Amino acid sequence: MSRTRTALALAAAAAAGTLSLASVSATAAPLPLAGSTTVTPAGHAFKATLSGKATLKAGSVTVTCTVSVSTGGVPAAPGNTNPAGPVSSPISPPTYGSCTSSTWGVTPTVTTSGAWSVSMQNGSPVTATMGLPTGGLVVQTSGLATCTVTAAPAGPATVNGTWTNGSPSTLTFTNASVPVTVTGGFGCPTSATSSTFNAVYKVTDTTDPAQQITVGP
């Protein structure tokens, strides 16, 4: 082999080695740590009340509810602060009432159960994650179509939203994806494997109504 060809081969091998090392280094780079989060006032109870309407859409069917409430509490200090991640707390299973269906002649009923939670991560925006247990939300319809929609059918699931500090603070879910299974006969969206959830909740301090539940660093 000529010197020129040998040099080219060595250069190509070196370049390939450099690319391989760069690829390994990029893959092995650790993810950045989450920022600090503090939820205040520590130890205070709160109530989340639906503002407007909540919608859950599976396939071509949309269920709309105008009443929904959940309660919970900010962890007592020092549990209300996390130097590198979110602050989580249990909440009561949200109740849903005054629900209607987009399908004529169909009446939906929403039931919830199990251990629910909410997790706040400070940032821009502040992210809020609602955790629901396996089968923790079930929509059953009656009338012209008898269907059962089960959320989180295969295991616990999370619903991603955002938090806005204010008076009162708000918890917003916009086109949040929720895994579901749908069973039933004619008129039921049985092919749906996910649903879309939209809702805005006003969150008030029930320990001291003069204060606001806030999320910061």
Image (spheres, grey):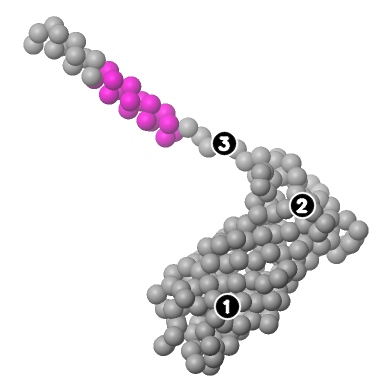
Q: Which class describes the residues within 10 Å of circle 2: few (<14), some (14-19), or many (20+)?
A: some
Residue 212: image x %, image y %?
Answer: 84, 55
Side (left or right) of 143 relative to 185: right
Task: Describe the element under mark 2 as helix, strand or loop.
Answer: loop
Q: Which class describes the residues within 10 Å of circle 3: few (<14), some (14-19), or many (20+)?
A: few
Task: Describe the element under mark 3 as helix, strand or loop.
Answer: loop
Instruction: State how far apart marks 2 and 3 are (Cα).
Output: 25 Å
Tally the numbered discs: 3
Range of residues picked out in magenta: 13-28
Instruction: State how far apart marks 3 and 1 are (Cα).
Output: 39 Å
Residue 148: image x %, image y %?
Answer: 50, 82
Q: Amino acid at mark 1?
A: Val
Picture residue at 38% right of the left edge, 30% below the top: 24
Q: Residue tagged by mark 3? A: 32
Q: Residue tagged by mark 2? A: 165
Picture residue at 65% right of the left edge, 66% below the top: 199
Q: Quadrant where the N terminus lies? A: top left
Image quarter of residue 130: bottom right
Q: Which is more foreground, mark 2 or mark 3?
A: 2
Task: Describe the element under mark 1 as helix, strand or loop.
Answer: strand
What predominant SS class does the magenta segment belong to?
helix
